[in-house]
Structure formats: structure tokens, C-alpha cells
Amino acid sequence: MSKKITIKIDGKPVEVEAGSYLLAAIESLGIEVPAACRYPFLPPRPVCKLCSVEVSLSGGEAKIVESCSYECVEGMDVRTNTPAVLEARKKALANMVNRCAENNLLKDIAGQMGIADEIKFGKELCTCIYCKLCIRVCDELVGANALSFKKGKVKEEEGESTPIVLDESKCILCGACAEVCPTNHLRIEEEHDRKLVHHDMELGPNSAISLSFRQAVPNVPRIHAEDCIHFRLGGCRVCSEVCPKDCIHYDDQDVIEEFEVGTIITATGFQDFDPTPMKQYGYGKLPNVISALEFEKMNNAASPTNGRIVLEDGTEPRAIAILHCIGSRDENYHPYCSRVCCMYAAKFAHLVKEKTTAEVYQCYIDMRCFGKGYEEFYKRILDEGVTVIRGKAAEVIPARYHREEEGKLLVCVEDTLISKFREIPVDMVVLCTALEAHDNASEFGRKLNISTGADGWFIEAHPKLGPVSTTTDGVFLAGVCQSPKDIPDTVAQAGAAAAQAMKLMNVGEVQMDGAYAEIHQEFCSGCKICNGLCPYNAITFEEDKKVSYVNPALCKACGTCVAACPSGAIEARHFTDEQIYAQIEGILS
Amino acid sequence: MSFEPRILGFLCNWCSYTGADLAGTARMKYPPNMRGIRVMCSGRVDPGFIFDAFRNGADGVLICGCHPGDCHYAEGNYKCARRIPLTQRMLKDLGIDPKRLRLEWVSASEGQRFQEVVTEFTEQLRELGPLKLHDINFDPAHPDPESLEGVEHA
């Protein structure tokens, strides 16, 4: 612990730590001190001199110092509002004001000091006040060393507008300089002044340390190493400085933990179908063509749009088309029905009607409202005025034929109920993309010894009699990893899987199947051929008897050893040679 | 009436038997010539079963197992895959066309493939004709060229 000392500020005694800066002590008394070059995560350096105060040491002569970087000394007497102090501050302000264009920061400070009428801005066009914060943050905190002051004067007649020089090869686009700039002189700007909303949605809160989304579990922020200044250049560490509980550990590594379990419930879910290859819908190419998941994110109250349904330019759409079966029920992509899309599309239509005045068009192949209350919900959106068109949308193209439709999209669809081809002008297109199995599902399934079907979903033990278990004992399936299903079905299956797993765990011991291989040791010649064949190492050689032995607890009854035994000494219970020969004879007789 | 071959199938419990089941539940049609015997793994198929099947009058034997890498028992299908070519060589020595013994990989989700395999194998055996094993009077100790007349050219 450092030493406490007592100083006097405007006549009041204050206890401070020895060696701390004077400014903190002054501000702790609630005295306002103007400043233009301060950034809490950089060591103070007196540039603006607006924080000048009068200090006299042990009755000595008073002198003007910059409080931001002046260390407290025992018994010092500080005055913050003497005429000399005000004069020094005015001079400092005038110094800055003279060589920059009009800006709010200096105006505010002048107002704070009560001299708003007295200042006169220079003729320069740039608002840089030469506080050097940007350069210092880039050098000292970020470590990119990308910024510097221009040597010589800013030649405004030659089009130069700033004294700051950027070395583009060193800049990492972290934005720290723009963040610290007190006058907003330095800015990070999108090229062409884009106002994208949809593309930003993926980013969420776009600092390098953030919650992935507001309801994330566990609800703690994470550092995104690829955006973090510290991980890119080694500097910064601001987040660990501000964290009051020392929760930020830069050295943390991913850890692989191994633990033994008796049962496994596979609930790996699905991945969203990427509609980019379906060029006819223009996803990723045309503005305002978005996938259902993106639309859902936009609708979330915690989204970048705060739950408003908007186009990329931030305006409210007047017509929205919701296209069903993108990638599902499609021979070129996935032949199966994704099951959930019809109902979430109906929900989307309902949300649009609730939040906006937009027209909603649904282009569907079949409306599959199969669940409890679903058909009623469908009826409800019809009553709300949603236009449903039976026919899969063929194409989405930019509408360029009529001027009043400029900027809109045309959805080309055959309305099969009236046998008419329609082109519907809309502002936004939502693609109801298929649920598809993870790319690595079969690789993962191999680890658990469960197989995937042609569509990539895990195969259950039996489609009717064993819908949650798999061919591997103790491995169960829950949710979409088995096949597309909606939330109630997933919850039901997950409950069943949990019950199945608990059934095994409750017993506490594994019940063996009656089928396993048995060696009749009186016939065993001890050739050891079977020992090497067993994939489960269930067969051991008993050295004393010179015969092999099958451990029935390890044997899974594949019968490979039985077929290989040259002496016919191994019997596969329930699949004995006699039984199979009898079957052969029976079938062929 | 055309010749209807009699085919004996050994189907692995985890893949092919389930695949055959799927073909059935999906109402896929395939020739009724194949009769299946369920074994836990294609690795259980003893070459003795195959010879016994031919001796009992089968015109063809079909063995179906899991695709390589998908075996429920990790590697039983590899054991089978090694045995079958050897068995085929032996069949040839016995005067039986090795094409009459076939090994195919059919997974649990491939009902369609099972249907195709059975249909195709049945067609192939129909072309090969009946085995007529009992007409062959073959004594390897005293090969008599005349007794080899009935032997299929392999």
C-alpha cells in the first residue's frame, strides 16, 4: 500500500496517495477541470494545458502547473480558480482555437469557462487540435505506429485537410484513433457512405469483446481474437484494466477435457442451408434478399435494428415476399420437407402484419400446417390479409421495367391455382431455407458408431419401434440431428432420450445381450487366429491351458471369430453354425 | 417359363438387413428369388455356409454388409471382404462360376440400392442359368476331361 499524504485544494484538506496525479484529487472534490487531451488508458501528457492550476509547495511561491500530470506532494496548496489559473487556461484555449476550424469541443469548453464570446476560431478548415491522442493511442496502446504528424504546414490550398498522416500498410483498421479523437476530426467511414443494416446483423455488437447475443448462455462476453488489438499486435489490454473483477485472461487456451460417461444423447442439430448456389433467388447478390434466419434475427428485439423490419437503406418495406421450400423438396438440393418452414413463414407474415403496413406474399408448394393449432394459425394470417400463392417462386430479379418500381424486386411465380404466371413487385424477399444435416455429421457419427442416412441425418434404431435409440447401445438421438422437426417434437424426443438414458443409468449395471461368442475349449487348438480378429479385444489366450477365451462382457457377437475358427470351436450363441445351416437347408429345400 | 434362380442372401444385421427392411417398408419391388438369412455381421459368414448353400441347390449367394468404414463392429466387413475373393477362387476350382457369389455394400438407408442389387443379381443369374451342380462329376484327384463337360467356363 502506498503512503497517504494530505494536500490542500482550494483551502480544503484532501487525503491522497503519494505520487498520484493532482487532477484526480481535484475531480474527487467535484471541481470541474476542462481538458481536451485526456484518455483514461494513456498516461497523462500535458498537451492542451487546459487543466492548469496554481500550486505552492510548503508556503513557497505559487506557480502554474498542468494538474493532469503533476504528482501530489505532502503539504502542497492547490488553487483552481485564481485569476492566474483562468488566465493560463484562456491562453491555452486561445492557442488551440487559433489554429483549427470551429468545433463543438472547444466551443463547449469555452462555454464552460464562461468565455464563449471571446474565442475566435482560426481560418483553417480542419478541426484537429493537435492533442496527439490519436497518434499516442496508435503507438502506445495499439502498437501499430500507423499515424504521425505531417512535417511542415498543412497546405490547404493543395487540398490537404489534416495534419495527420496515415501509413496504410501499418493500419489495422481497429478504429481506436477515431474513438479517442475529441473533436471527431478522425473518423472511420464506410466507402460510398453505405447504410447497410442486414449485413451488419451478423456482426452484432461489433467490438472485439462482446456478448455473442443478449440471451447467450453463459451470459459473459468473449474476446474475438481476430478483431482484438491485443491478439493482433500485443498492445491495448484496456478491457482487463477496466474489469473490476480481473475476469479477463488473455492466456486462456481452449482445453480439451476427457471424461467417462455411460450414455450419450446426440443433439447436434442442423445447419442452415446456404441459398447462395441457387442463383435464381439472388441471395448475396441482390439487396434485401435475406434468409429466414436473418429475418428472424432482425425481428429479435435485441437485434441491430431493435426488432424493426427494415430494408437495407433503413426504410420500412411496403411489400415482402416469403418464399417457401428454398432447398427443401427440391431434387437438386434436398428432396425432403424441412417441416418447420411453413409455420415459421406464417409467423413471419403475422409479425410483418403486426409491425408494419407492408403487403405479404407467401409463395408455397403446399401449406403443411400439421400440428396442434397450426391450421388455425394459418387461417388467422389469411384473415390478416396475407396473400398466399400456390406455386414455388421461380426467380427473383431486380425490377427495372417501370420507373415506379425502381429499386424493387420482382418475384416471378406461377400461381398454379389460377394457372397464371405472376410477377410480384416487392421490397424484400425472405427465403425459407432448408434445414440440413451438418457437413461433418457422418464423421461425427462414426465416432459414436451410428450411421447417417442419405440425407445426412442420423439413423434411429427403428423408424417406428426405436425412434430415439441408435444401433449403438447407450447412444440416443434428440432433435433435428435425427430428422427435421419443430420445437414440440424436439422437446418430446429429447424427453424420451433422457428417459432412455436414465433407464440405463438407474439400473447401474449393463444388461448383456444373450448373443455372444463362446469357445468350446476342448476343441480349441490354441492357434490364436481368433485373438487378432476381435475388434473389441474380447478374446484372450490362456497361457496355462493353451486355449483362447472370450470375455462375454466384452463380446458384441459379431461372429467374425466364429467364421474364422479352423477347428469350429467357437459358437456364436443365437447364430450357431447349426442354426444357420438349418436355415440354409430350410430355405433351399 | 423362364428360369427362376434361387438366391441365398446373408444380410448383416445393422446395415443390409435394415436396408432390406427399409426397401420393404418403402414398398419397393424386387424379385422374390432372394431369401435372406440375418447374421450379426458380414464377418460371421463362414465360407462353409456358401459351399453348403450351393450344395443345397442355390444358384447364387449374395452377401451384403456395411460400407467400408461403417461396420458396426469396426472391421467385420473388411474380414468378409478378404474372405470372399478367396472363396470365389475356390468356387472356380470346384467348377462353379465365381460370379455366382457376390459381395455388396448396402447401408441401412439404402433401400433403393438393396432393391437394385437384388434385381441386378437375379438378372445376372438368370443369364448364367441353373447351376446344375449335381451334374458335375468332378474328382480333383483324377481329372477326366469328359467329366468336365458340365463345368461352367470360368
Image (tube, grey):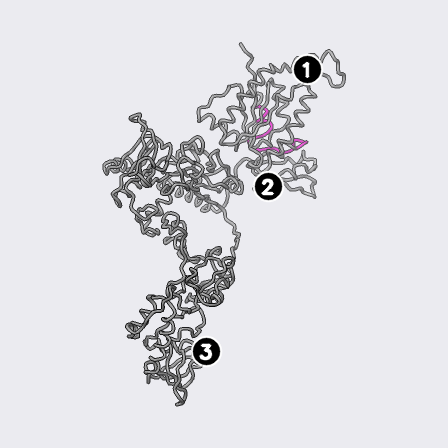
**On the same chain: label 1 and label 2?**
no
Q: Is residue A570 magenta?
A: yes
The answer to whether residue A479 is seen in the rendering is: no
Q: Is residue A156 magenta?
A: no
Mark in front: 1 vs 2: 1
Reading the image, the residue beneath label 3 is: A1
Outermost residue, right direction?
B142
Mark in front: 3 vs 2: 3
Q: Position of residue B37 (x, y in %)?
A: 54, 26
Give A555 or B1, whichever is nearer the viewer. Answer: B1
Q: Which of the numbered marks, if any, corresponds to residue A536? A: 2
Question: Residue under mark 1: which chain is it in?
Answer: B
Query: Are there few (<14), some (14-19), or many (20+) residues within 10 Å of tag 1?
Result: many
Q: Position of residue B108 (x, y in %)?
A: 50, 32
Mark 2 element type:
loop
Q: Is residue A215 above or below residue A560?
A: below
Kindly indicate whether the residue at mark 3 contacts the one at mark 1 (C-beta within 8 angstroms).
no
Q: Which residues are magenta?
A: A565-583
| CA–CA distance in space, label 1 to label 2 | 43 Å
Mark 3 element type:
loop
Outermost residue, bottom direction?
A59
Q: Which of the numbered marks, if any, corresponds to residue B151? A: 1
